[in-house]
């Protein structure tokens, strides 16, 4: 079941959901709008290797915006820091963003219970499009969990994305044992 606006507010009061900064105007009927943070990143290497640490170059989005190019992967970050202690958060793109040809995640739209951080966005575009710091970029939807939780994300020893950041985080696939 998806939480409604009232339920999201109740869970915020109970300490189960945190959004910083929080703006009541961003609360939808059953979602919360998140915005593009100040930083983007691109990978340094043209060919990425899943078994090695692929380094990124991080840069600030200028005041006049930045034009994203097709055929290039950009890592973005949400302006909002979030914590979700009792629900499964899903990040979806806003329809207005999708209608500009912007995809904000290739595969990682679901967070884990216990995820506490900004959200790194996997941004790609179908044609050149100018984006801006602070623009609405996505929406968080919260799902109820059935059953007890044994392994909260923020308490996992092997969680790779627990360090609080305001910049995009590159893939840590190389840290997996396989």
Image (cartoon, grey):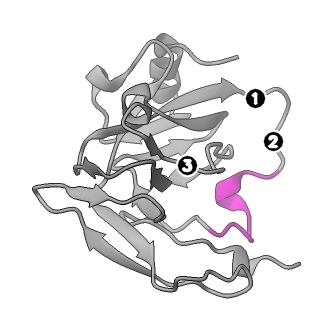
Which type of secondary structure does the marked residue at label 1 adopt?
A: loop
Marked residue nearer the N-terminal end (1 or 3): 3
2 vs 97, nearest the viewer: 97
How many marks can you see?
Answer: 3
Q: Which residue is mark 2?
A: 149
Percent of width and height locating residue 32 = 43, 27
| Residue at image coords 68%, 43% | 113
Would residue 176 be found to the left or right of residue 165 on screen?
A: right
Quadrant (top left, top right, bottom left, bottom right) of the N terminus: top right
Say if 83 sits above or below 28 in the image: below
37 vs 56, nearest the viewer: 56
Q: Which residue is mark 1?
A: 145
Q: Nearer the viewer, mark 3 or mark 2?
A: 3
Percent of width and height locating residue 67 = 26, 57
Q: Nearer the viewer, mark 2 or mark 1?
A: 1
Tell me where the magenta segment starts and ends, as one range.
151-160
Q: Is residue 83 magenta?
A: no
Percent of width and height locating residue 46 = 53, 82
| Residue at image coords 71%, 81% | 174
How crowded pointer 2 is (Cα within 10 Å; few <14, some 14-19, many 20+) is rated as: few
Q: Give residue 128's mark.
A: none
> Can the viewer see residue 120?
no
Q: CA distance from mark 1 to mark 3?
A: 23 Å
How crowded pointer 1 is (Cα within 10 Å; few <14, some 14-19, many 20+) is rated as: few
Toward the front, the furthest residue is 127
Q: Nearer the viewer, mark 1 or mark 3?
A: 3
Q: Give residue 105's mark.
A: 3
Say if 109 sits above or below 177 in the image: above
């Amino acid at each position: 079941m998806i939480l409604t606006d009232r339920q999201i507010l109740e869970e915020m009061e109970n300490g189960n959901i945190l959004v910083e900064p929080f703006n009541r105007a961003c609360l939808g009927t059953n979602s919360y709008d998140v915005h593009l943070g100040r930083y983007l990143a691109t990978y340094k290497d043209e060919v990425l290797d899943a078994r090695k640490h692929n380094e990124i170059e991080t840069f600030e989005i200028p005041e006049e915006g930045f034009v994203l190019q097709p055929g290039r992967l950009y890592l973005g970050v949400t302006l909002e820091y979030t914590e979700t202690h009792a629900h499964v958060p899903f990040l979806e793109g806003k329809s207005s963003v999708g209608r500009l040809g912007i995809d904000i995640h290739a595969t990682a739209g679901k967070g884990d219970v216990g995820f506490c951080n900004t959200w790194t966005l996997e941004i790609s575009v179908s044609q050149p499009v100018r984006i801006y710091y602070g623009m609405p970029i996505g929406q968080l939807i919260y799902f109820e969990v059935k059953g007890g939780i044994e392994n909260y994300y923020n308490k996992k020893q092997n969680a790779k994305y627990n360090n609080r950041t305001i910049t995009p985080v590159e893939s840590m696939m190389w840290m997996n044992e396989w």
